[in-house]
Amino acid sequence: MSTTPYDSINFAQTRILDTWQRYADQLTWGRGQCLAILDDGCDLSVPQWQVEMPWGRKVIASYNSIDDNADPTPVPPGYHGTSVGYPSSLNHEGVLGVAYNNFVAQIRAVSIVHLSGRGEADTMAAGLQWVLEHHQEYNITAVNLSPLDDERHQSPLPTLIDGPLGALREQGIWVSAPCGNNGYTDGISWPACQPDCFSIGATIPGEHAAHLDRFTNTDLLVAAQATSSSNAYAAACSMILREAIDVGAYPWQDHGPTIADAMLAIFQQTGVSIEDPFVPSTFHELDLLAAVDLVLGR
């Protein structure tokens, strides 16, 4: 079967396609690792999430922290969670996401992805706590924390999610969230603004230029039309980089106190420098090939 990248333009700009080609015989593109996706619910009956890979089913776990059960089915107004995992994890009829061989845990943690304030911090915290309690069982190495409040935050906001976020960071698990899509240059959304959650912004597809929400507390930019996709790409790229670090026995401790911190530092060090006169600030655009080349000695 011929294969097609989920997003050929942005995959090329992020050099995901180059990484697939150069390391085709060395890396497995997420195989054995699980990505936890926290959003407003996922319809597990769609064909994309019914996939059976040779080493197991694509979705290996699910949880609903709102109702405390295993059914993540979205309830109106929820709409976003079914498709948010496609950029990172799709492996369906030859269409491939970034880490297309990974496993996925689908978690309904909020009623709708675009939050009204922080009233659902308790269910988000419960979803993150579930990840913390099950990460060894499912080998969860990355979390796509996709809700956002569409406000302008220049500093963290203490809420119930901070405890589990800190505990996940201590375990070396990558947790990231989108900055937002409103074009703000003076603040980013919660929970992306939290200190133990990497904040992911975006560059314009086809250009090395920042767009959408960003501020000096933005950690990384990734080429995409929306920061939910940027964040999905970043989480999946962290899974590929994690495997490369393992394969190359790379001393990640030189870059940070946890492997998650180290991976962000490597992405920043090897990324394309983006000068943004509107913030103003210098950001780093993710370049997966440069990051993997670094840890594998190219």
Image (tube, grey):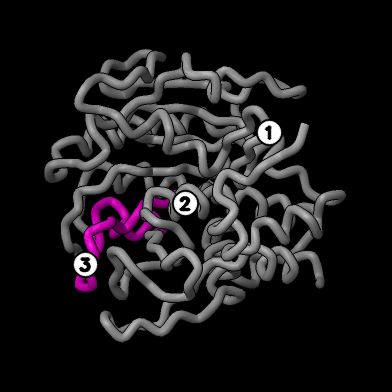
Badge 1 amino acid: Gly
Q: CA distance from mark 1 to mark 2?
A: 34 Å
In the picture, residue 193 is in which quadrant?
bottom left
Q: Position of residue 96 (x, y in %)?
A: 63, 39
Camera-nearest label, 1 or 2: 1
Badge 2 amino acid: Arg
Up-down: is 128 above or below 157? above
Q: Are marks 1 and 2 in contact (CB under 8 Å)?
A: no
Closer to the chain start, of discs 1 and 2, is 1
Residue visible at 37% across and 42% down? 164
Q: Is 130 covered by the magenta stretch?
A: no
Q: Which quadrant of the rendered structure holds the C terminus?
A: bottom right
Q: Which mark is residue 94?
A: 1
Q: Which mark is residue 184?
A: 3
- Residue with the most extreme right position: 25
* Mark 2 surroundings within 10 Å by alpha-carbon count, few (fewer than 14), some (14 through 19), many (20 or more): many
* Mark 1 surroundings within 10 Å by alpha-carbon count, few (fewer than 14), some (14 through 19), many (20 or more): few
Q: Which residue is mark 2?
A: 169
Badge 3 amino acid: Tyr
Q: Position of residue 158 (x, y in %)?
A: 20, 53
Q: Which mark is residue 242?
A: none
Q: In the rendered view, does 209 fall on the left or right side of 273?
A: left
Magenta residues span 175-198
Up-down: is 152 above or below 112? below
